[in-house]
Image: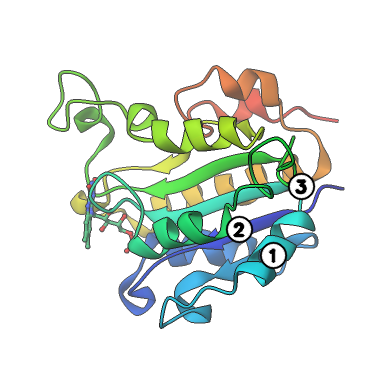
Amino acid sequence: MKKILINFAHPAKSRSNINQALRKAVEGLEGVTINDLYANYPDFMIDVKSEQALCESHDIIIFQHPFYWYSTPAIMKEWLDLVLEHGWAYGSTGKALQNKLFFQAITTGGDASTYSKEGHNGFTLAEFTTPYQATAKLCNMIWLPPFAVTGIHQGLAQEKMQSHAEDYRRTIIALRDGFFDIEQAKLQPTLNSDINTMIRSL
Ligand SMILES: Cc1cc2nc3c(=O)[nH]c(=O)nc-3n(C[C@H](O)[C@H](O)[C@H](O)COP(=O)(O)O)c2cc1C
């Protein structure tokens, strides 16, 4: 069984709908740790050693967050700047994250059609995540496309939100228990674009 660390960042949790729904769907699952960055570090004073130890003790690292200015909420950038130290995460002796899986679980206001060359935002979601792809590569991690929930601005019906939450839970369980098709997933625009193909039945 793989151990999964979810670094969760939402600066206004009380106003969150979708991130809270996704989080609730995986909270308490065996082998899954939720590391709420804004709750743990309201002053942004990130405990580097403790965060590094958390990474070391897990096999899969997920950044779950709303999409803010085509990127992450600020604390995630601070986390990267401080935690990914030379000699630990990268460099000739930096092997702590080697072969761990990494992906983002992103929720966006804009709908899927806006995230294309022709669409309002001009780039795909995968293109916006290239800095994370490059970071994962530098740290010898295995990068996967994001688990994405789009179109929050238009409002998601409760039913739709529950269905995304259930997909997230299935994805996490399949990754944890080794029946998620990692090679197939690498070829998809998002992890959940064709979820039934990605999750192998035992
Ligand atoms: C500061 C800020 C920046 C945002 N930037 C974007 C953005 O670049 N692209 C986008 O699609 N949505 C953007 N949004 C919308 C959020 O992504 C959306 O409200 C969020 O995913 C909803 O999740 P929640 O219900 O968990 O809060 C932004 C929202 C805020 C508050």
Seen in the picture, residue 88 relative to 46 is either above or below; the reply is above
Residues 189 and 43: in front is: 43
Amino acid at circle 3? Asp
Q: Position of residue 37 (x, y in %)?
A: 50, 71
Q: In the rendered structure, which disc, 3 or 2, sits on the residue that comes first in sequence?
A: 2
- The numbered mark at residue 124 is none
Q: Quadrant of the C terminus?
A: top right
Q: Quadrant of ligand 1?
A: bottom left
Mark 1: is the Cβ under 8 angstroms from ligand 1? no
Q: In the rendered structure, which disc, 1 or 2, sits on the residue that comes first in sequence?
A: 2
Amino acid at circle 2? Ile
Badge 2 local density, few (<14 within 10 Å), some, or many (20+)? many
Q: In the rendered structure, which disc, 1 or 3, sits on the residue that comes first in sequence?
A: 1
Residue at horizontal 80 percent and vertical 62 percent from the top = 30
Please say if the residues under marks 1 and 2 sit with CB atoms less than 8 Å apart: yes
Residue that badge 1 annotates: 33
Query: Is 36 on the left-hand or right-hand side of 172?
Result: left
Badge 1 local density, few (<14 within 10 Å), some, or many (20+)? some
On the image, which quarter does residue 161 sit in?
bottom left
Seen in the picture, residue 9 relative to 98 is either above or below; the reply is below
Marks 1 and 2 sit apart, C-alpha to C-alpha, by 6 Å
Residue that badge 2 annotates: 6
On the image, which quarter does residue 50 sit in?
bottom right
Query: Is 141 on the left-hand or right-hand side of 63?
Result: right
Badge 3 local density, few (<14 within 10 Å), some, or many (20+)? some
Please say if the residues under marks 1 and 3 sit with CB atoms less than 8 Å apart: no
Residue at horizontal 48 percent and vertical 31 percent from the top = 134
Marks 3 and 2 sit apart, C-alpha to C-alpha, by 11 Å
Q: Position of residue 131 (x, y in %)?
A: 41, 35
Residue that badge 3 annotates: 59
Q: Position of residue 43 (x, y in %)?
A: 41, 82
